[in-house]
Amino acid sequence: MGLLVLMGVAVLFGGSTERALKSGTFTQLDVQILDSKTLKIEHNGGDPLTFGESTSIYLQHNGIEYEISPDPPVVLEVANNMKLSLPEGVELKNGDSAIILIKNERKNKTIYRKELILNPSD
């Protein structure tokens, strides 16, 4: 419950919120926007994740949720990263915000959540 309160406070103050949880272990991930159509996911600690099989990636943007998991499945080990293209027709522009969710589908648990806010250009 305390984690939800902290996340709510961070959202109210315009900061990004991150949550990396996994039953029994801690998974350290980092998601970055490389350009308007590409995300980079880095695995910094914890168990390997099989994206596109037991682990799925979702992007919430403009009220729509998109699954952007790779096909065929990809195993992401610690100290590795992968790049994913956004779905066709989806483009993140300066000033946009989006939420990235990474879920363990077998346990129906969110293991990572991050609100991405693209800085407006000067």
Image (spheres, rainbow, N blue to C red):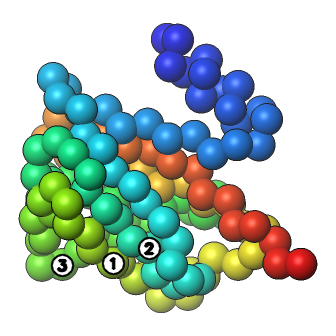
Instruction: State the separation of the CA atoms marked 2 and 3.
Output: 15 Å
The numbered disc on residue 39 is: 2
Answer yes or no: do the residues labelled 1 and 2 have beta carbons within 8 Å?
yes
User: Does residue 39 appear left or right of residue 55 in this picture?
Assistant: right
The amino acid sitting under disc 3 is Asp
The residue nearer to you, when weighing 79 against 7, is 79
The amino acid sitting under disc 1 is Lys
Q: Which residue is mark 1?
A: 83
User: Which mark's residue is nearer the viewer, 1 or 3?
Assistant: 1
Q: Residue visible at 12% across and 59% down?
A: 77
* Relative to 3, residue 57 above or below: below
Among numbered discs 1 and 2, the one appearing first in the sequence: 2
* Relative to 25, residue 74 above or below: below
* Relative to 4, residue 101 above or below: below
The numbered disc on residue 71 is: 3
Q: Position of residue 89 (x, y in %)?
A: 55, 87
Q: Residue visible at 35% across and 78% down?
A: 84
